[in-house]
């Protein structure tokens, strides 16, 4: 097994998965942050007579959280032992080579997976960029359509 190419494939897969998964993780953490802040503020308003030192500390920590810059979201897998074991053990290099598969074909497949993930991420970015109405709710679509012809939708 060509160790440098295996390492290159491993790093490439990690980077491709990270680029592909990170944007959705940032959005999910942002939504969780809003939810937690709302719940904590609500609990403070429900019990105005109680001291809220613990709740205030939790609120501060949730408000300080910046999902866009949070490096912990880069760890899409708790640790990458699973992916490493797949590359090292589960592929069973010796058996595949004994069956007639060339090591170059195996590495080529790993690099194809990397290219696929990169292209899929780029495709999703382009769809979002050129079809901004895809993520609108039905009410927002109706308002937008009415605005095109110069009408206002009553609220």
Image: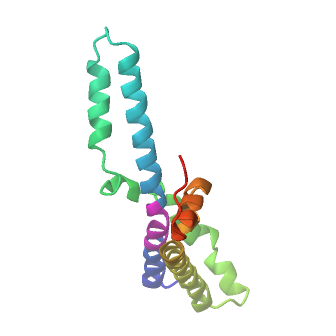
Q: Which residue shows up at 57% across the image and 79% down it?
A: 113
Q: Which residue shows up at 63% across the image and 91% down it?
A: 102
- In this view of the protein, which residue sits in the foreground, 62 or 76? 62
For residue 27, what is the image quadrant? Answer: bottom left
Q: Furthest residue to the top?
A: 49
Q: Which residue shows up at 55% across the image and 70% down it?
A: 149
Residue 45, visible in the rendered structure: yes
Q: Which residues are magenta?
A: 15-23
Instruction: Please give left or right for residue 12 compared with residue 112 in the image.
Output: left
**Prevailing secondary structure of the magenta residues:** helix
- Residue 145 lies in the magenta-colored region: no
Question: Residue 49, image x and y in percent?
Answer: 31, 8
Q: Can you say whether 139 is above or below 10 in the image?
A: above
- Residue 21 lies in the magenta-colored region: yes
Instruction: Please give left or right for residue 131 compared with residue 44 in the image.
Output: right
Q: Furthest residue to the right?
A: 99
Rendering colour mode: rainbow
- In this view of the protein, which residue sits in the foreground, 48 or 85? 48
- In this view of the protein, which residue sits in the foreground, 155 or 78? 155
Residue 78, visible in the rendered structure: no
Question: Residue 26, image x and y in percent?
Answer: 42, 55
Question: Residue 38, image x and y in percent?
Answer: 41, 33
């Amino acid at each position: 097994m060509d160790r440098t190419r295996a390492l290159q494939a491993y790093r490439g897969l990690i980077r491709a998965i990270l680029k592909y998964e990170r944007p959705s993780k940032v959005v999910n953490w942002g939504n969780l942050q809003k939810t937690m802040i709302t719940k904590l503020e609500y609990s403070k308003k429900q019990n105005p007579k109680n001291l809220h030192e613990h709740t205030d500390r939790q609120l501060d920590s949730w408000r300080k959280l910046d999902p866009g810059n949070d490096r912990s979201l880069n760890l899409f897998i708790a640790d990458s032992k699973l992916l490493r074991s797949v590359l090292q053990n589960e592929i069973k290099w010796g058996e595949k080579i004994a069956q007639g598969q060339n090591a170059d074909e195996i590495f080529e497949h790993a690099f194809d997976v990397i290219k696929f993930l990169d292209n899929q991420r780029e495709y999703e970015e382009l769809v979002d960029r050129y079809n901004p109405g895809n993520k609108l709710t039905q009410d927002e679509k109706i308002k937008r359509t009415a605005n095109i012809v110069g009408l206002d939708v009553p609220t």
